Image (spheres, rainbow, N blue to C red):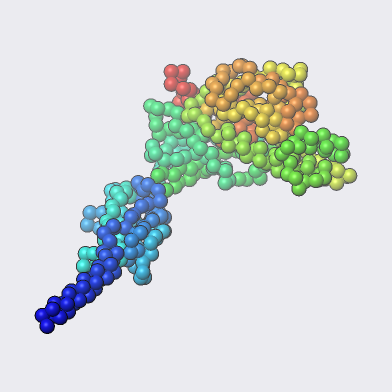
Amino acid sequence: MARGKSRLWLIILILILVLLGAGAFYVWPHLEGDPPQVALEKPLKYLGKSNTVFLRVSDQGRGLAWVRVTMQQNERKGVVLNQAFDAPGAPVASLKLAVNPLEMGMRQGKATLVVEAADRSWRNWMKGNVVVKEFPVMVDTTPPQLSSLSQIIRLNRGGTGLAVYTVNEAEASHGVRVGDQVFRGWSPWPQQPNTKLCYFAYADGNPQGMNIDLWAQDPAGNQVQMPLNVKVRWKNFKTDIINLNESFMNRVAARFADQIPTDRQTPLAKFLWINQELRQLDNAEIAKAALPSQPYQLWQKTMERPLGAPKAAFGDRREYVLDKKEVSRSVHLGQDLAHTERSPVKAAAKGIVRYAAKRGIYGNCVIISHGQGVASLYGHLSELRVKPGDEVQRGQVIGLSGMTGLALGDHLHFSILVGGVFVNPTEWWDPHWVQDNVLLRFSEAGLSQPLPPGQQ
């Protein structure tokens, strides 16, 4: 009898242990102790009038229960987000927050964005693991102040303009906007950090009457814009008719045989791809290569005019005709100069080589940055004598003229780019233009030329 009772109690004990083990096996995952992870998509330092903040909250345990975002400044507190998640809980929440400090009664100055999140763990008496993360921010809803130091700026269609102005915030981005085209400004006077300059272009393809404005935007996203006093002289460029034939188109296509898409089968289809699509791609890549620049003016006086008799000019229109029907158009974005074959090609001014390689219709070409968004391009070269990163001096030989790319005879294609936009290069060879459109801007503002330190 006693042995039977002992066996019964043993069985009961085993059942209790099994039940406890099963319960622990079920409950233990619900008691995981890792809190949710909180991260902003990008660092947040300033908040302006209206802000979009992207927040990522994740929990790889039991999933998210809720997320709450508030903004706090001394005794003021505003709710940005209060979101609960249905069971079983989202493992990840990518949240787009609309943060409007003024609507929450915040003032200019320091504040804190507070993110709280909890998971569905049974810890903390079923309240879950809670994380609180604070992001210090600066509330700034006041736009920068702009002031132009330039008087009337006279600008040619396809030409370059220069604006000198002040911006009262050191960290603000700034420049000139021509229509939708944005040109970056520079701060080249260390002793006058609020004084800026910006070279800008009225692109040859722009219509008449586009707005030309100064702009500035601070790190909080506050923007200001004001019109510049610019008078645009409108110039009509000449048009050349080029009659195509199969022999000519085949000659052109042969130069780009390794680049033409295989679905372009006919001589016309190949020519159109080269003259339109490849040209557009080349110009975009050249603009990208020409944009990296320095804050100081590396050139002085004028750009040196390359050797050679002038041929095709900047802005020349070309209409391509096949069987008395127009099939394509292009615009010449530089000045062609022909001298003797394989003539030495010299740098127009001091600068840094940004590109030295083959580039589509331009063939072997060199791009040199001269500071403040101004760059020069030398195309169709037969030989390159510089490499990217080289510092070159005015008059230094950088290559030899040739007929690479879309050139059908030995010559140099010379271009100037401002902020990545092709402009008329002949302006930059003219000392009168430089005096009236560059040096005058500095004297109006009582400033020295923005040369590198030690050269002013």
Q: Is residue 229 visible?
A: yes
Report the residue at 44% width, 32% height from top: 187
Q: Nearer the viewer, residue 233 or 131?
A: 131
**For residue 260, side relative to residue 147 (left or right):** right
Answer with left or right where residue 447 lies relative to residue 299.
Answer: left
Pick out the residue farthest to the right: 323
Considering the image in quadrants, where does the C terminus appear? top left
Task: Determine whether 263 is above or below 305 in the image.
Answer: below
Query: Where is 402 relative to 21, above or below?
Result: above
The answer to whether any part of residue 70 appears in the image is: no
Quarter placement of the N terminus? bottom left
Percent x, y of residue 211 = 57, 45
Q: Which quarter of the picture shows residue 257?
A: top right
Which residue shows up at 85% across the image and 46% down it? Answer: 325
Q: Residue furthest bottom?
A: 1
Q: Position of residue 54 (x, y in %)?
A: 41, 55
Rendered residue at 77%/46% (across/down): 264
Q: Percent from the top left, x then y, of residue 96?
A: 41, 58
Residue 304 position (above or below residue 225):
above
How far from the left and from the top, in percent, is residue 387? 58, 24
Q: Is residue 372 above or below residue 16?
A: above
Which residue is farthest left?
2
| Residue pictured at 39% horizontal, 31% vertical | 193
Is 1 on the left or on the right of 328, as rendered? left
Q: Along the line of sight, which residue is nearer the eye, 284 or 270?
A: 270
Q: Which sits in the foreground, 454 or 405?
A: 405
